[in-house]
Amino acid sequence: MSSAALAPAAPQISDHIDDDASQRVPFRSMLRHVGAVTRRYLILIKNDPEQLMDVVLMPIIFLLLFGYVFGGAISGSTHAYLQFVVPGMLVMTSIMAGSTTGVGINTDLNNGVMDRFRSLPIARSAVLVGRLLSDQCRLLLGAAITVAFASLLGFRFQTNAGAALLAVLLVMAFSFALGWVFMIVGIRGKNPQAVQGLSVLVTMPLQFGSSMFVQADTMPGWLQAFVEVNPMTHVINACRGLMTGGAYAHDLWISLAWIAGIIVVAAPVAVRMYRKKI
């Protein structure tokens, strides 16, 4: 990492903290540290816009492929299928943002950036949270572009602005929770390629074994049982109800329970592994 890359963050990190006692960092100082690290990662994205390709271009490509190749066969028309698949595309974008978190942490661990952070008087968990928040910004940009492009193709919100905003917030919360899981994978992985491969291996069955692309009742019975317990199914169904109408309360509450459970379990594990790693 170049010294220029660290330059924006260093002046804001001024509190003296013992490296092995980050848990005793005052809350306000912790927030400043998180803000500084988040700003650093956002500056890196600004200097290297290619980092946005996964959350910007991939959803557009998938919308075109699934809408125009499978739309007629699945829903009878591309327009009808867009109303069904766009909420699932938003959740897919959240998965892409989460997997990038794991790859990014692994890259930083292997190229010495984390050693540089260790030498700074900041809370260690601030590095992980800052990384997650910067990826949430990437996701928000990707979600906005996905919805805008889908609108050009014919997608229309059938609810109200509040419900649509709640759907986006739910997707971001789900991505934040998944980010902790991918962070564990990133810390444990030997190299970025291994992390990327493992992330795809884990997320691919979860994506296609959900209601992301087709209705669950068209699947075999054994697969429907998996779909019902898949947290992505509930997040997608809740977003679908919030964006295009229909019941969503049941799936929304289950989604929030999954998000809280994932964070409660994965976040402490990720922080502990990170402290041992550096």
Image (spheres, rainbow, N blue to C red):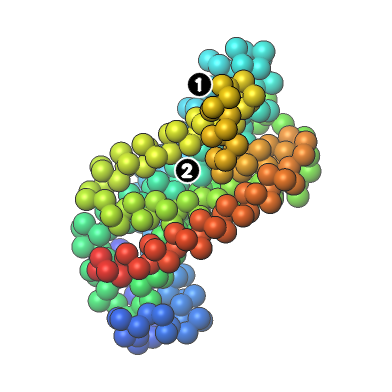
- Quadrant of image for the N terminus: bottom left
1 vs 2, front mark: 2
Q: Amino acid at mark 2?
A: Ile
Q: Residue at x 21, y 62 (%)?
A: 112
**Numbered badge on residue 65:** 1
Q: Residues within 10 Å of mark 2 (few under 14, many from 20)?
A: many
Q: Residue at x 30, y 81 (%)?
A: 20
Q: Name the secondary structure under disc 2.
A: helix
Q: Position of residue 115 (x, y in %)?
A: 23, 68
**Numbered badge on residue 90:** none
Q: Is residue 259 left or right of residue 6?
A: right
Residue highlighted by disc 2: 95
Q: Amino acid at mark 1?
A: Leu
- Quadrant of image for the C terminus: bottom left
Q: Is residue 52 above or below residue 221?
A: below
The image quarter in which residue 236 lies: top right
